[in-house]
Image (cartoon, helix red, strand yellow):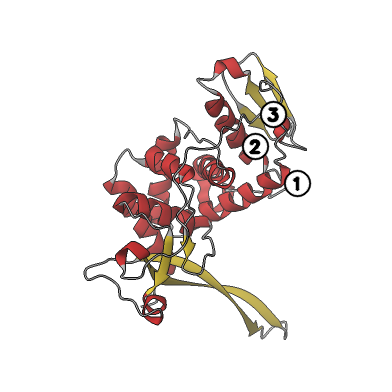
Amino acid sequence: MKTDIYAIVTQQIIEILEQGAGQWEHYLTESARACNVARNVEGRPYTGINAITLAFTRLRHGFKSNRWATFKQIQAKGAQVLKGSKGTPVLFFNVVEKKDAVVGEAQRYAMARYYTVFNLDQTTLVDDTPELPVEAPANVKGCANDFVGIKIEHCLSSTACYTPALDRITMPHLPAFKSEAHYFSTLVHECSHWTGHESRLNRNFSGRFGTYQHAMEELVAELATCFFAAATNTEFHSQRNSAAYLGHWLTKAKEDSRALVTVASKAQKACELLLQHYKPAVMTGAMAG
C-alpha cells in the first residue's frame, strides 16, 4: 500500500489540536510571539505546514530549543536521540524529471517526501547556537500607511473587510479596537485576503473545497497573519471566529489529507507577498485612523 505522505503530516497536527481542545488561538498566538522560528540543525528556517507543525509541537512539549534534526544528522554529530523520544514528521519536496511519452520531452514534477525530526531537547546534542531571549514583540504601531500599493480606507463601522470587486480594504477607525495590536492584527488579516486577488496570487478554493472555500480562505488569512507577526516581531491577536473555521478545517482535513498542507502553503505565499508591500514608516506620532 502506497504511503499517504500528506496524511502522516496532517494527522500529526490534527492530534495536537484535538488533544488541546480550545487551544487553537493559544497555539497561534504563542507561535507568532516566539522569537526563535523553527530551524533545522544547520540553521535553515522551516516554512508552511512544517513551521506550524514544529511550532505547535514545541509549545505542546515545552521544548526550549528551536532546532530540529533527523536521526542520521544527530548520529553524524556524535550524539543520540534520548530513549522514548517521539519524532515529528515534516514534509519536503524533490523536483524530479520524467520523460512524457506524449510530449516526448522531460517534464518536471514536485515529489512529496517526509522525514522525521527530533528537537535537540530530545537528544544528547548540545544546542550551541546563541540563545536569543524570549522577548516581547517589538513596540510597532503599525498602520495602513505601512502597506504600499494596497487600497485601504477607514470608515465609521465596527466591521473590517476586503471587497474583491473593488480591490479595497475597509477598516474601522482605531478607537473601535481594544488596542493598537488588535487593530494591526485585523489590518494584516484583511491585507492577507488582498493577496488572493486574481491579479496577484489568484487564490480560489471553489473547486476542490466546495462549501468549505470560505473557511479555507479565512484560515489562509489567519495563518498568514501569524506568519507575518513572527517575521516582523509584532504582536498578534487571533480572530475570534478562528475556532469555528478550525472546525471546518479539521473536518475537511480528515476527508482530504492535502487540505492542511495546501492552506499552510498558500498562507506562506500570502505572507511573503504581504512582506513585499510592508514598508513601515518611521514613527513620528500616532497611528493613522
Q: CA distance from mark 2 to mark 1?
A: 14 Å
| Numbered mark located on residue 283 in the image | 3
Q: CA distance from mark 1 to mark 3?
A: 32 Å
Query: Would you place residue 175 above or below residue 6 in this image?
Result: above
Q: Do the numbered discs 2 and 1 sit on residues whose CB atoms are within 8 Å?
A: no
Which quadrant, please, contains the N terminus?
bottom left
Crowd rating for badge 1 (residues with CA inside 10 Å; few <14, some 14–19, many 20+): few
The residue labelled by disc 1 is: 199
- Asked if residue 14 lies left or right of residue 202, the reply is left
Could you say where residue 232 lies in the image, as x and y percent from the top left? 59, 43
For the point 58% across and 36% down, the residue is: 189
Looking at the rendered structure, the secondary structure element under dot 3 is loop
Q: CA distance from mark 3 to mark 2?
A: 21 Å
| Numbered mark located on residue 191 in the image | 2
For the point 66% across and 86% down, the residue is: 101
Query: Which quadrant holds residue 217?
Result: top right
Q: Nearer the viewer, residue 55 or 98?
A: 55
Q: Nearer the viewer, residue 97 or 77?
A: 77
| Numbered mark located on residue 116 in the image | none
For the point 64% across and 82% down, the residue is: 97
Q: Do the numbered discs 1 and 3 sit on residues whose CB atoms are within 8 Å?
A: no
Q: Earlier in the sequence, mark 2 or mark 1?
A: 2
Camera-near label (1 vs 3) is 3
Crowd rating for badge 3 (residues with CA inside 10 Å; few <14, some 14–19, many 20+): few
- The tally of labels here is 3
